Amino acid sequence: MNWREKTHSELKPHLERTVAHTAKERGAYERAPDPANAQLWIALAQLHKMISDVHVRLQRMEELFSQKKSPQRNIRARSKQ
């Protein structure tokens, strides 16, 4: 039995996706002195990239939200005067 089949049902789709994405870099990690270790580093780098991409998107959304919110604050401040 494959060890991946023993993973929790909520984790399994994420694991399979990570394995599939990492397999795309097979040409790189197979050339490493320790391919298994290199494969893990590639998976880690891919996850880091995903987190970084989400962080950038969140920052953009926060900027847009604060820009939309700012004019309302100005209007409220003026109406109180």
Image (cartoon, helix red, strand yellow):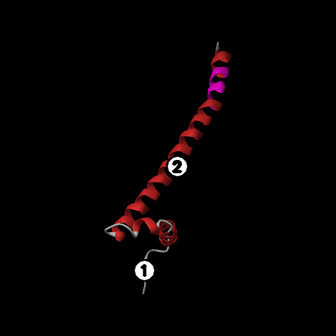
Image location of residue 26, percent across then percent down: 46, 69
Crowd around label 1: few <14 · some 14–19 · many ≥20 (10 Å): few
Name which residue lies at 54% across and 40% down.
59
Q: In this view, does 67 lie above or below 74?
A: below
* Kind of element beneath mark 2: helix
Crowd around label 2: few <14 · some 14–19 · many ≥20 (10 Å): few
Which residue corresponds to mark 1? 6
Name which residue lies at 46% across and 68% down.
27
Q: In this view, does 28 lie above or below 2?
A: above
Image location of residue 13, percent across then percent down: 52, 71
Which residue corresponds to mark 2? 53
Q: Is residue 63 above or below residue 22?
A: above
Q: What residue type is labelled 1?
A: Lys
Name which residue lies at 67% across and 21% down.
75
Figure quadrant of residue 41: bottom left
Q: State the extent of the magenta-drawn residues as a range.
A: 69-75
Residue 16 is tagged as: none
Image location of residue 52, percent across then percent down: 48, 48
Please identify the residue farthest to the top as the structure is shown.
Answer: 81
Are the residues tagged 2 and 1 within 8 Å (C-beta)?
A: no
Image location of residue 30, percent across then percent down: 40, 70
34 with respect to 4 (left or right): left
Please identify the residue farthest to the front as the structure is shown.
Answer: 31
Q: Of label 2 and label 1, which has the lower sequence position? A: 1
Name which residue lies at 65% across and 31% down.
68
Is residue 9 found inside the magenta-colored segment of the image?
A: no
Q: What residue type is labelled 2?
A: Asp
Please identify the residue farthest to the left as the structure is shown.
Answer: 33
